[in-house]
Image (cartoon, coloured by chain):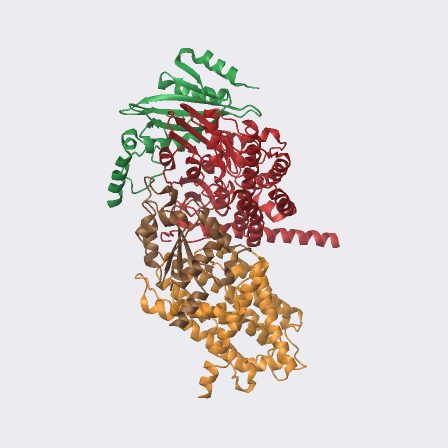
Amino acid sequence: MENVFYYLVFPGFVFTGIAGLLVTWVDRKVTARIHWRQGPPLLQPFWDMIKLLGKEITIPETARKTGFLLAPLFGLAAITLASTILWMSAVFPQKSFSGDLIVIIYLLTIPAISMIYGGSASGNPFSAVGAAREMKLMLAYDLPLLIAIFAVIWRTGMKLSFSEIAAFQQSPAGGTILYSISGVILFIVALMCIQGKLAFVPFDAPEAETEIVEGACLEYSGAALAVIKLTKAMLYFTLPVYLVILFWGGLNFAGIGSGVLSILKVVAVIVLIILIKNTNPRLPIRKVMRFFWGPITILAVIGLILSMNGL
Amino acid sequence: MAKIIPTGPFHPILEEPEFFKFHVEGETITKIDMRIGYSHRGIELLSEEKTWDQVPFLVERICGICSFSHPYAYCLAVEALAGAEVPERAKYIRAIVAELERLHSHLLWMGLAGHFIGYNTVFMWVWKWREIVLDALEMTTGNRNHYANVKPGGVRRDIEEYMIPQLQQWLDELEPKLDMLIKVVMDDPVLHARLKGVGVLTKEQAIDYCVLGPTARASGIDIDVRRDHPFDAYPLLDWKVVVLEAGDVFSKAAVRLLENLESMKIVRQSLKKMKPGPIVNEIKEVPEGEAIGLYEAPRGETFHYIRSDGSNMPIRHKVRAPSYMNILSNEVSCVGADLSDGGLITAAHDPCYSCTERLSAVRDALPDFVLDGKELAKLSREKTGRISKEIQQENSKIEKELSK
Amino acid sequence: MITVKDTIKKLEAKFGSRISVQKGANEKQYFVLLKDKQDNREIVKYLFKDLGARFNIMTGIDGRDYVEVLYHLTFDIPGNGFIITVKALVEKPLPNIDTVSDIITGAKWIEREIYELFNVKFKGHPELIPLLRSDTRPADYFPFQREVKDTHISIREKEKGVKEK
Amino acid sequence: MSLFMKALKKSPWVFHVNAAACNNCDIEILDCLTPRYDVERFGIKLVGSVKHADALLVSGGVSANILPRVLEIYEQAPKPILVIAIGSCGISGGIFRDAYNMVGPIDNYLPVDVYIPGCPPRPEALIAGVVKALGKL
């Protein structure tokens, strides 16, 4: 029973959902401020969700019904699981099992796959284009991300569980990954990949709202659209936490001071993402792939080599 | 890719139904077919059922951005036919409202062009400043656009004394912003790299296609109806016509930017020179005959031809908006450009249907793929992104050499 | 400095009896009536190429038994620009006239529009297809023709026909 | 269901259809986005796909060749959907009412909830119109 509470309420669905929606609110507010606009009120994302839940779900007859409706639910389930495991390793270190890093890596790719499946199932040419681009984007950022994570595992002495990685970084012997040359390089690589995973502006070809009209989620409406937007919001909250745990000495809520510090780290990563989002134009999907396979992968390999011989 | 049939999805760029088909080899455009007429409303037939005084209301609703130019050209035609003389004060009021509208139209295009290249903040800021011009227009004529201010023989609404200081204060508020905008555009390396040499329209092509307004002045043709066919207050004021030579998208933007300053000058001088007096002398009856009225709209010369048989209604009224000639020049200025610039060039001369709602590129081997207007906007934004990166790299290289 | 006076003199010298010149509404607008519509290419070419006029637009006016085709050419001289309009009368049953789009490329679209609205065929036009092409209008419906326009009500009937289809 | 209605009032997503308008109503809709009016404060968002929309802003008296497309858009929109006719062209066909290829205002074909008068209607009127439409729910 206790696990159900963990999955559904505390670090799981409810907590991440609310936090995710708050983060999207911060994002919309900051972008509006840059435009000298006032931006939406605090509860706006919540009202959007509730409204979408009430709207009618229209299914185009060209769509494969079951796939079209189930795909978003897969994405939501995956992100809930991922965020629960992530937070469990931070709040109750003894609960985390060895190898949960590998589980998280898989779980975090399922939302993208669910978007691809949903987009192509909807039968609309626009969404087909959106789904194809999402696939290309996934291929692009997966390689450098895995190299960066492997470098972290190598640095912490081949440990595969979050709590051990966090413990290693906090212990005087290890020292946080970020405070070393290779650490900084790996952090930048991971940040770019996170930006790609969230499909934000420099790499938002799949769902570019002024491009192919909302991309893959064009045909979704009502509750199905609410699920997609919620998954995106929860991703927006979970990925910075994922980054902080791997690269920035993990989250520990032992004392008040360290708890506040780790929250600030997460906020810092979010602000970084918003900054990248607002300061550069969009890249076409071909350029995005070339960008990821070219400079970013080379950077990741350099980071790996540097961290191998102890820099 | 399958055929995409968007039917008016909203897009921050003003979308009006216009359809371009680029024939593409690899990335460069070889040929373009254009199809217009989606919002053809048969206005010329309607104006034959309206009296001389009702036609300005119809003619001003041809297009939302130049809603003072069409009635103004029409009234000049009627006044030529009736041989009426417009009172002095009415001439200045007409010049003020006309130039304010030119400012409002150029700023609107600036914002949209900024969005098209990828600078969303420019879009928001320029439209924020444009509100000042709309306030001025609303105070002097009562409406933000569709001013219903000009009528054959004079003007409908007078500019009272208390309005003048407020107008001058607004203009002083706007002037520094325009200068800042000009500085930003003139020496922003990314814009130079992005817009220079793109979609060039040489002088000979411009003459052959008879393009008008800023599009012609950007290609070195020194024509401006306000100076060549002088009417009303323009010969009494001193201002100059901005002419550039390069004919590319950059000089089309630069011509518009510098024209804004000229319009400000005209409005300021007219406000000073205006003396109290009557603002209209009614035209009793329009004799039989035909006449032509020309006016320099923000996008070029508008042409109105009227023919009357002495009755109180025109029997034929021909209207030609400037974009009618400018859009045709796409045929030449687009060829040779690469696809991501295609949308930018068609939007560069600010066509009155300023949109590329649907654009399909036809590749000989592949089945043709349809790019929505928005996709075009994305392509052009990416190019900006790429160019700004290259420039940053160059700058960093230069700094490294300097620092050594 | 080209002025109105000597342009008219040049025209009369070159075309003499084939044209008759009338003054328009004011000093700056002159109308040149062509006796025979075949001369339209020659006079437009002379005005556009030799005298350096700018082609403004063409207008179609539907008369009882002929269609008037007007070519408006403008001279932009700072301070005293003027407009010369060449009028050609095209008899009704089968209105057709030579195209000028090979002399002035800018005239391509307006000739297609006049063809679509007045049914005037321009011989030699590269692709004479309707310009506005609203797809619900039957091919033989020319809204600007006098027979259709005279009785305003008839437009509504014809229009109703279009709507039911 | 009142919570859903309250939510609908708080975040109305709007989709714009240009049925042969003179592009001035489109400019005023764009003006609502700009810093001075900024409709995002009320949660109003302009969406690119009709599937996400709660309200249809139809501007312009409908012309013959755009009518079938506007009807198709209406069918695709998820119900409950509001139809708001913009400007005097939207209400009565305006000054182009008896042009030969205009087929009458939008309410001959779609159930219209709110008419926003004005040529062009001011941005404030547009916002008030959308808010009034929500009140009708």
User: Quadrant location of the N terminus of chain A?
Assistant: bottom left
Q: Which residue appears farthest toward the right when viewing the image?
A: B404
> Residue B308: which quarter of the image?
top left
Corner quadrant of residue B139: top right
Q: How far across and down, in percent of the image, does residue A149 sit?
A: 56, 72
The chain letter of the red chain reads B
Q: Nearer the viewer, residue B370 or A275?
A: A275
Q: Give the residue furthest to the front.
A: B277
Residue A29 horizontal/vertical position (percent): 55, 64
Looking at the image, is D51 positioned above or below residue C119?
below
Instruction: Give how far across and how far down residue B291 sits, in percent.
Output: 44, 25
Q: Does residue C154 sit above or below D86 in this rendering?
A: above
Chain in orange in the render:
A
Inspect this view and state whether residue A184 appears: yes
Chain drawn in brown? D
Asked if residue C11 lies left or right of residue B175, the reply is left
The answer to whether D55 appears left or right of B377 in the picture is left
- Drawn colour of chain C? green
Q: How many marks?
A: 0
Among the 4 quarters of the image, the one containing residue A33? bottom right
Residue A191 lies, in percent from the top left, at 57, 67
